[in-house]
Image: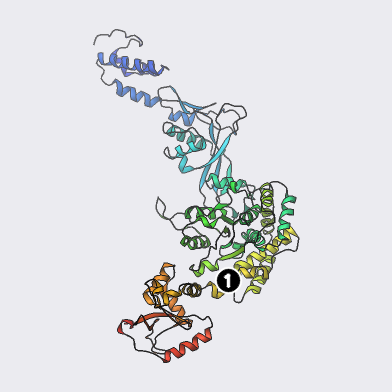
Amino acid sequence: MSEAQATPLIGQYQLEDFYTDKPYAEVYNERNRFMQSVMLNKMRDLAVSLGFRGFMTQWKAYLSSQRSDQQIDDLSNDTAFEKQPMVLQCGSYTCTDRVTRINEFGMEVEVISHPIMPVKRVVNIETQEAKLEIAYIRGSKKDTAWKTCIVSREQLASSQRIISLANQDIAVNSENAKEVVRFLGLLESKNYDKLPLQNSVSHLGWLSDGSFMPFVENISYDGGSAEFSRICDSFKPTGSADKWMELVKSVRAGRSVPARIALAASFAAPLVSICNALPFFVHLWGTQGCGKTVGLMLAASVWGNPDLGAGYIKSFGGTKVSQELYAAFCGNVPVLLDELQVISDRKMFDDIIYMLCEGMSKGRGAKEGGLQLQRRWSTCMITTGEMPIVQSNSGGGAAVRTIEVNYGGEPLFDDARTVANMLKENYGFAGRVFVEALRDPEVVDAMKAQQKKFYSKLSGDIQDKQVLSASILLAADKLAEVLIFHDKKNLTVDEIRPYLVTQKEADINYRCYQWMLGYFAANLRRFDSDDTNGGEIWGTKKDNVTYVIKPIFERILRSEGYSPGAFLTWARRNRKILCDDYGEGSRNRRLTKRVTVGGRSTPCVAIIDNDEEEEAREEEKLEYDKYVQVEDADMPF
C-alpha cells in the first residue's frame, strides 16, 4: 500500500498507525467541537484511502476507554460553591457558580446552571422512608440566600420525576434531567456518612416517645406538601403572650358559652387519643355576622396563626381526599373547617362526619402492589356554618359524633373585628404549654380523673358517645384553667348539657317520626277527599292517627333519605303505628293497616300522632280487637 498524502488539519499516518491510539488521540484532544468533527471526517477518509475499513469502530472503542465514568468515582475533588452550606466531594465535576463535567469527547458539558447539593439525609421515624434535603441557590446578587427542599429518593432517582423540581425554581428540564440525577446521586454516594441525619414525621401531634410535633427541636416535618409545611412553620409564638392572655380571659369571662366551647374544643384535641376516644365534631352554627369564624380563629390561636390566609383554617369546599389529608396532617391538633354552607349537597354532611370521625384514611391500592400506608388521626374537628351539620335524616352515628352548638342570633363577641385583629397579631403560646404539661404522668392521671367525674355527671339520658366527647371537652377546659388561665371560669356540666343529644334524639327513626308528624301536619289537604288536594290523595286522617297509602309513604321517606323498612320495624316495636296482626306471638305480622281511602280498601301506614307511649299502646290494643280481613296481597308469603 502506497503512502498517502498528508491531509490538512491532521498528521501524516500510515496504515499501521491506525492499529495504535495515535490518530484517535489527535482527534480526541481537539477541544473545539466543530474542528474535532472536521478532523474526525478527514481522519476517517484517510483511513479508508489506506484500506482501513474499521476506523469508526476503533474510534468508538477509544471513546469508551476515555470515558470519565470511572474517573468520576475515583477523583478526589471538592465542591467550591460560593457560601456553600458544606463542602462535599464531587469526583471530576467542577462545582463553582454552576456544575460542569468533561464528557467522553473531552469537552466541558454543563450539568446545571446554578449551585445545588444535598445537605441532609431525612428519615421518617414512623415509616422509615428516606429522603434528601437539597440546597440550591440561583441569581448573582450577593444577598441571595440558599433555599432548601426535602425530596424523596424515588424522585431524585428518576429523570422523569426529577423534572417536577422545576416548580421549586431549580433549573432542571427534560434536556439535563439525566445529568442532574447522575450528579446528585454521585454526591450522595461519595458523602453518605458526611451528610447529617435528620429525623422527621409527616404529621402534627403526639409521637411515640411522648413528644409533640412541632414542639420538638430535633425532628422536622417532611410531608412533601408546601401548604402543610407553611402551616407547620406557623405553629410558633408570635406577638405578645400577655395580650393574647388578656383577650382570651375576657372571652372566658364573657356571656358567650359557644365561644368558650370553641376554645375548650381546641384544648380537647390532644386529649382524644389519651382518653382512648374516637374523633368528634364540635359544630358552631347560627345567623350570619355573629362571629362564628372569629370563634374558629380563637380556637386556632391556641396553636398557630389564625389568619384565614395562613392556611390552618380550611373551608368545607375542599374535596373529601383533601379533607382526609388535612386531618391526617393535623394528627392531634384540632381540624378547623369554616363555612359549611359552601357544600351544596347536604347528603355529603354525613359522609364527612363518618369519614373524619373514623380516624383513618381509606384503604387504597399502591401502584407497586399491596396497600398504601393508612394515615391516622385522633383529634377534635371544630366547624362552623349557618346551618346544622346533622340533619333530621342523618344516621345515628353522625348525630352522636357531633356536639352541635346553636348560638342563634347572639353574637359570640362584643367586638368581633377587634378580637380578630388581636388574634392575628398574637398567637401560638398556649398549645405548647398545654401539651408539655401532659408529658407528666401525674397531670395525665389528674385529667383522666376529672374526665371520669364529668362523664358520671353527664350520664343518664344523654347518648354515651356524646357523654364521652363532652367529658373530654370539659376536662380539657378545666386543665387549661389550672395550667394557663387561673381564672376559675371553666365550663360546667350545666352549660354544655343543652347542646347534647339524648338517647332518643340520637335515634334516626325517632327523628324520622318527629319529622313526619310535622311534614304531614303541613300537608293536611293531601288527606282530604275534596278538590283542594290538587288531585293527589296521600291517605286519610282520623282523630290522632294519620293513614298514609303505603307506596306514597315509601316514596316520601326515600326522597328524604330515610329507610321505610327500618322505620316501620322501629315504629312497630315502639308502638308508633297501628298494624293489622294475627295477635301477639304470631309469626305472621304486617306493618300496615287496611283502611278505606277514596272509597277503596287500601293498605296504609297508620302513624299515631301521639308521643305518649302508654296511650299509643292502649289505642293499638283496641285496634287489634277490631281486626279485619286482609287480602292475599298483604300476606307475608
Q: Which amino acid does label 1 sit on?
A: Val
Which of the 4 image quarters holds residue 292? bottom right
* Residue 514 visible from this viewpoint: yes
Q: Nearer the viewer, residue 175 or 346?
A: 346
- In the picture as drawn, the residue positioned furthest to the bottom comes out as 625
Q: How many marks?
A: 1
> Which color scheme does this rendered protein use?
rainbow
Quadrant assignment for the C terminus: bottom left
Q: Is residue 534 left or right of residue 124?
A: left
Q: Which of 47 and 455 is in front in this view?
A: 455
| Other-residue count near label 1 (Cα within 10 Å), few / some / many at <14 / 14–19 / ≥20 | many
Q: Which of 454 and 9 is in front in this view?
A: 454
Q: Position of residue 114 (x, y in %)?
A: 52, 29
- In the picture as drawn, the residue positioned furthest to the front comes out as 531
Instruction: In the rendered view, tell whether residue 181 sits above or below residue 276.
Output: above
Instruction: In the rendered view, tell whether residue 554 sits above or below residue 312.
Output: below
Q: Where is residue 481 in the image (x, y as percent from the top left)?
A: 72, 61
Instruction: In the rendered view, tell whether residue 519 sits above or below residue 424.
Output: below
Quadrant assignment for the N terminus: top left
Say which residue appears at 53% left-offset and 72% top-offset: 506
* Residue 211 visible from this viewpoint: no
**SS class of the residue under badge 1?**
loop
Instruction: In the rendered view, tell whether residue 60 sits above or below residue 475.
Output: above
Say which residue appears at 43% left-offset and 30% top-offset: 69
Q: Is residue 521 left or right of residue 475?
A: left
Q: Where is residue 238 in the image (x, y as percent from the top left)?
A: 68, 46
Q: Nearer the viewer, residue 385 or 348?
A: 385
Q: Where is residue 426 in the image (x, y as percent from the top left)?
A: 69, 48
Q: Mark 1 points at which residue?
A: 501
